Image: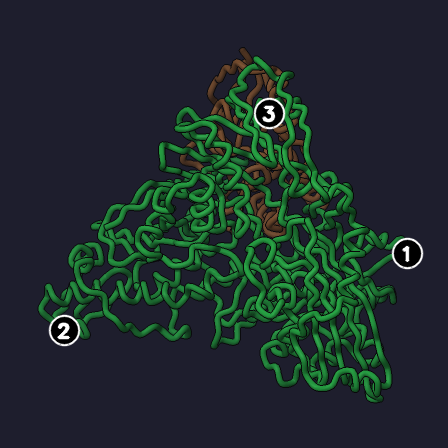
Amino acid sequence: MIKLTVNGKSRSVDVEPEMPLLWVLRDVLDVKGPKFGCGIAQCGACTVHVNGEPVRSCSFPVSAAAGKKVVTIEGLAPRGRVHPVQKAWIDHEVPQCGYCQGGQILVAAALLKKNPDPSDKDIDEAMTNICRCGTYARMRTAIHAAAKSMKPAKA
Amino acid sequence: MTKTMNQTFVPSRRRFLKTTAAIGGGLTVGIAIPEALAQGSKGAEINVWVVVQPNDIVIIRYARSEMGQGSMTSAPMLVAEELECDWRKVKVEYASPNANVRRKRAWGDMASVGSRTIRNSQEYLRKGGATAREMLIAAAAKKWRVPASECVAEKSVIRHAASGRKTSFGKVANDAAKLEAPKEVKLKDPKDWKLAGTSVKRIDIPATVMGRQRYGIDTQLSKMVYAAVAQCPVFGGKLKSADESKIQGRRGIIKVVKLEGAVAVIADNWWRAKEALNDIAVDWDVGTHGGVTSESIMEFLRAGFTQPGVPVVNKKGEVDKALSSATKVIEADYYTPYLAHSCMEPMGATVQIKGDKVDVWCSTQTGEGTLATAAKAAGVPLENVEVHRTQAGGGFGRRGGSQDYTRTAVQIAMAMPGVPVKTLWTREEDTQHDFYRPAAMYRLKAGLDASGNPVGWTTRIAMPSIVATLLHLPLKNGIDPPAVEGFQEFPYSVPNVRMEYAQRDTHVPVGFWRTVGWSQNPIARECFMDELAHAAGKDPYEFRRALLAHEKRPLGILEAVAKAADWGKPLPAGVFRGISVAEPYGSYSSAVIELSVNNKKEITIHRIVTGIDCGYVVNPDNVAAQLQGSVVYALTAGLWGEITIKDGRAEQGNFDTYRMMRMSEMPKVEVVLAPSGGFWGGVGEPGQAAIIPSLLNAIFAATGTRIRSLPLKNHGLTLA
């Protein structure tokens, strides 16, 4: 049995250690937020946080997540609440089909945690997930807006 | 009333979110987003589009599909505009394809294809709203014993001014549902719209952002099993044998299913199925196409240039005579490659067959097409199938007419009677078994007189027919309509023209790739037009303007975009512009691109101005989003997109060999909305038509090199 925490809940799974985390989440634990897009860590639709770091879960063996905290788009904000990045995504109407957006939001949230005031170049370097609908410009606007909203209010 | 089994989405509003002050420290914001997904809709069905609940919630049914194009919001907006309901109390749900069969197509066409969701349904949607409003008013008037003409509805409230009485939609809905619908209703003049024409927030976005949106791939059913599938890599090939000895007794493996041209493994999760599939030794009968290559296809297309007896799709004047007396004759060949759709959500569907009943859960652009395909594959009547639609993780034409993924999923599920089977393709399978944008060749010839005016123009298009090979429909006069777009209705005032089409079908499946013929024909037409302007020594914008003087709508969008892009004003040293115009899907589009190219053939795109005249704009921000997205889809194709064929199969597989544009490569895009009214044009596809022609024309302006085949990577050109 492999034990891990998913969105705050302890879970144990009896699967092959090399099974990608994506498929453990989707098919074993019924957590559907992380999406399958390529299976080779190219597109990032499967992005989740493992101990706060964004990883491409399609190419991340579940054994590497043992004992760690996994957060998916469903768990980015506590129930009934919304993360500032999610709020910015809604305010700026970022998604089109939306399939990649859970992964995009998780990468953006991790970026802002490390770098509260990212430049366009910082955003380019961090945001390497593919969006086929072409929402890149709105994502950039939303990340800047989220960064602004997360700054501590001036005393 | 008829119940549907579909999801209901509670609309979100930016207004609601804006009332919450942003807070510091990276904490989450303490607001509740309404639970977006609900099930079923009870209430009084006023007509097929409008269901009203006692608490004044109005359910507006949506018949077509949502794949990110936003019509699931803008189509109901048109119903709500006439209904005079409170948009904050509107929920939207999919109409049921099964109910559409049983109720004699009460909801009409359910397909979101060809940029037609709004333009082809706007009239009956608005009438649906207006009819329901009149019935609700009539019910209230009857109760009050006053003439209906003295009552008005606004924001779901009905008032009778003279007596000061008022009631709400919910209170009179049951009575209204029993009334006969008025035969004639007057629709609003769009200038009087209150809701339509404003940037209403898309109803599906909150669920997406919170991770609650459900796509076909997310279907979860009790006792469901999972299938991975491999189809014969050579298109049209058959399965000879599949040796499953290596996966015998492997954990989780349930069954191997052998189909005519595919083999599938069913397991208790998809990863186990896919891993096991890799270990099955498959022998394919590749048929007669195993030796086909891109080169042999190009030769075959090129032979279309000299094919005798092909149909003339557009003829005016005496073109041969005009060309022989021209001062200058210009000739050029253009080539556009096969392209894959690459929806982010790979193909797949979940199917459960219980006796002679079939249920399908999938992402689709055509609920009716999915239903008909499933019925045929399972051998049951249409009435026995239900299609449970979800948001589609991209469509771009891939999830429309072909429905091959539905057929395969049904065939696999037939091996597991009673059990829901979720079939999912790998990315490689998705790329290698697409219905590609057709490869096409164009031969163009034109003559200029001594003043540089075009006197004659001929085009020979050599391209496979989508209509004949995918839809299996007969071609009227031998002409494939999508293949001749932009040439059949040629807007430029050239006195002598002859446009011809040579149907060149190969074994490579072709289909409707976003913007279809308008994604490729303008590359030949608008770049060749640029060649003529250059040969005439004229400014390419002014050259077009003169030839479009009598075509007010193409001229209008060309001028609007040129003006927004400051055409004619000096640019910084080393920066150059390109322009083009097109008339796709009943709309008019144009783009100006500014770029520079350095001595390493690296392109920097400084600015893209892209514009549309779609007649009426229902949701401006959504139209802008479609234009912004279309830039990315077009540039991805123009820069890198190319499916090549070797040994009868597609050479590209995953995103490492079929490259997608990313954030760092996104240029600055400005959108021009120039709706001129009086017609309804499409929105989802027109935004691509002018992008690549303008890009190539700008590259010519910058380098003096005319690019006549794509993608740009094959010319050593890349982004800086």
Q: Could you tell me if residue B697 is visible in this image?
A: no
Q: Nearer the viewer, residue B342 or B573?
A: B342
The amino acid beneath tag 3 is Val
Disc marking residue B147: 2
Residue B194 drawn at (x, y percent): 38, 67
| Residue depth check, mark 3 versus mark 2: number of the one nearer the observer | 2
Instruction: Choose top left, top right, bottom left or bottom right for residue B498.
Output: bottom right
Q: Which chain is brown?
A: A
What residue do we see at 59% from left, 81% from top? B552
Where is B315 relative to B359, above or below?
Answer: below
Looking at the image, residue A25 sits to the left or right of residue B451; the answer is: left
| C-alpha separation, residue under disc 3 versus residue under disc 2 | 67 Å
Give the alpha-carbon distance from disc 3 to disc 1, as whole Å.
44 Å
Chain in green in the render? B
Residue placed farthest to the top in the image?
A: A1
Tag 1: Cα neighbours inside 10 Å, few (<14), some, or many (≥20)? few
Chain letter belonging to callout 1: B
The residue that mark 3 highlights is A50
